[in-house]
Image (cartoon, rainbow, N blue to C red):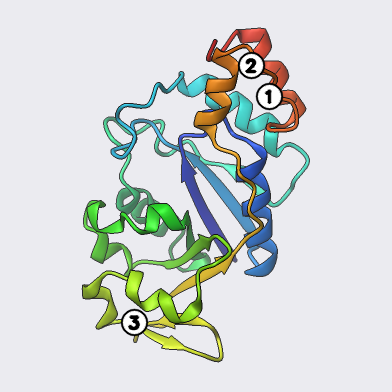
Amino acid sequence: MRVGLFGGTFNPVHWGHLRAVEEIRERCDLGRVIFIPTNISPHKESEEIISASHRMNMLESAIEGNPSFTISEVELTRVGRSYSIETITHFISTYGKELTLFFILGIDAFLEIESWKNYQEIFTLCNFIVMSRPGYEVRELPQIIPAPLRREFRFHPDEKRFINSAHLSIDFKEITALDISSHSIRMLIKEGHSIKYLVPEKVEEYIKIHKLYS
């Protein structure tokens, strides 16, 4: 099975997350996408992150009804910071060759990939799908791939993706631009404004009931 791994704090989960991943699932023929809430993100130390249980509950209600979406608590049960290489290794060791893994991330995160733990090794373990915004020309893409990876990956014009000798790929996919962020949602709540139509209805109700972010 072709499986996508999509990590994040989901603080809170919103329609931007869900629509982007649904587009990727369909366009990349993924049988399943696993949402992976982080415990302690090494890249968002200053962010006010609510408890894992609240984030899990909201995420569960958000993906309800989509049989292709599921959740893994692997990073929430791991002590300390959440590193992608450890998560990917977990899925490989658990499922072996049963799964073909695709690590899904946004273009902004990809641009910071060199700051990730053992980032070069990650690209030897699984495929990457990078969600890009409208305006990234294909001819510009080689310039945003870290120099050490350019020696390993070659661009295939017919497939419009980068492939290495092990047939692992870096695939840039332009998605519908929904200008929604968890940070902006938290700020709206703090200022007493509506977040209707930015998050699923059940998530909005959950936030109100538990008085989150206010």
Neighbour class for label 2 at 10 Å: few (<14), some, many (≥20)? some
Q: Residue at x 45, y 82 (%)?
A: 139
The residue that disc 3 covers is 153
Which quarter of the figure is the N terminus placed in? bottom right
The residue that mark 1 highlights is 195
Residue 20: x %, y % from top left: 63, 53
What amino acid type should be assigned to the residue bearing mark 1? Ile
Labels 2 and 3: the sequence-earlier one: 3
The answer for how far apart the CA atoms under marks 2 and 1 are is 10 Å
* Amino acid on which the number 3 mark rests in the picture: Phe
User: Could you say which is closer to the camera, residue 47 or residue 117?
Assistant: 47
Dot placed on the residue nearer the N-terminal end, 2 or 1: 1
Q: Tell me the quarter of the picture where residue 24 sits.
A: bottom right
Residues at badges 2 and 1 in contact (C-beta under 8 Å)?
yes
CB atoms of marks 2 and 3 within 8 Å:
no
Which residue matches tag 2? 207
- Give residue 157's position: percent from left, percent from top: 51, 90
Asked if 9 appears above or below 177 in the picture, the reply is: above
- Give the CA separation, mark 1 to mark 3: 42 Å
Query: Seen in the image, is 125 located left or right of residue 99?
Result: left
Label drawn at residue 47? none
Residue 211 in percent (x, y) is at: 60, 8
Q: Is residue 205 left or right of residue 75?
A: right
Looking at the image, is 107 positioned above or below residue 54?
A: below
